[in-house]
Amino acid sequence: MLRAILVFVLCLGMWPALADAQDAAGDRAATGGAQTLEDIMARQRGEEVAPKTGDAAGAARDLSGQLGTLGGASDPDLWRALRYGSADITVSSGGEVATVLVQDGGMAWLQFRQGPLAKYGGYLLLGTIALLVVFFVLRGRVKLDYEKTGRTVTRFKSFERASHWLLAGSFILLGITGLLTLFGRMFIAPYISKEFNATLLMASKYIHNNVAWAFIVALVAIFVLWVWHNIPNRTDITWFAQAGGIIGSKHPPAKKFNGGQKIIFWSVILLGGSISLSGVSLLFPFEFPMFMKTFDLMRSVGIESLPIYGPLPEGLAPHEEMQYAQAWHAIVAFVLMAIIIAHIYIGSVGMEGAYDAMGTGEVDEAWARQHHSLWLEELEAKGKAAPKDATPAE
């Protein structure tokens, strides 16, 4: 129906000129042999129209009435080259990005984002929360085995706590806004309104792009402050063998950071660093491509394919670089969010006295002796903590 209306409008506007051309030539000379509006109308009326192919030169000389392909012929090789990025395109501005007229990989990225990414990412977060609930029901809160002494030791100084909370707060904001961006179209727009979702997404984009810098600054600060305390050592083997005290009746000895905390630390540094790099690439589109260089490096050491993914690509359009960056950014963020959920559990309801370390920076000596005995012994040796048999403070 729409086509018929469009043809009718075109007919009203172009009929006089086309009629004059037909009268003057009596055939398709004016269009170089290409079909005319009269041919189209005749076909609409069910009349047979004899196919004719004129010469391309004639069509190129006068295209005013031509409704067919330019030059009188189609070029499937050209369109195929455009689709797969192999056409020789020259542009006056815009650089390499503007030479990509058809980006075939965009659909694969969209399907991945709306399908596996949202599905398995959501399952990961919900599954982590469910497992922690089950663990809490079965194990309960990890309580102190010793009576509180009333004496405290400084666990973290003010700058350490400020850096931690800046990292934690920014990551929570980034996680929430990222989830809203991914799931808003699925769960907000259909049930509340598209307008509300659009407003929410605009706010999320503004927050996400700006809070990202606070996350990066805090990440660097945390690395500088604690990296030397998180170098693996032999005490970590004992800690893992006893699962941090879950196996057996005693809590394994540990220095300032135990084996589990070191896992959290390096997860935050490595995964958070990877998220930051891909995020900067997304904040400055097409300026910092990373993935083609990574694939080339992998091939140089003999890695030609990856499990599940398959063969490594041999060339990426600028837009595909951004799509890879966005996909990697989201995948790594989901993994880190699951780890941080577990960390939040341990630091709040999961362990008695754990929150004090980052709340006030002071922990009771009984807590320090139970969870970080080697660290407390070092403080006692330096005179920064009272001896084990000291009288409790009034």
Image (cartoon, helix red, strand yellow):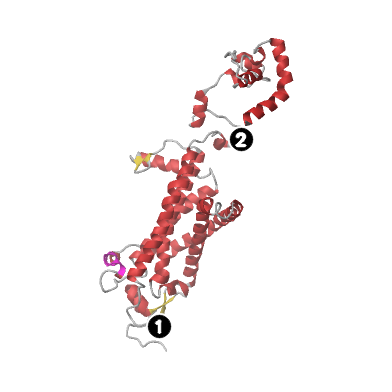
Residue linked to disc 1 = 151
Rendered-image quadrant of the C terminus: bottom left
Residue 234: quarter of image: bottom left
Question: x%, y% of residue 127?
Answer: 39, 58
Q: Which residues are magenta?
A: 237-244
User: What is the magenta segment's predominant secondary structure?
Assistant: helix
Residue 238 part of the magenta segment: yes
Query: Which residue is found at the position 41% from the left and 43% from the top?
Result: 294
Rendered-image quadrant of the N terminus: top right
Question: x%, y% of residue 182?
Answer: 50, 51
Residue linked to disc 2 = 93
Question: x%, y% of residue 248?
Answer: 25, 71
Please name whichever residue, 319 or 93, is drawn nearer the observer in this view of the structure. Answer: 319
Decide if residue 107 is on the left or right side of residue 124.
Answer: right
Q: Amino acid at mark 2?
A: Ser
Secondary-structure class at tag 1: loop
Distance Cα–Cα, label 1 vs label 2: 70 Å
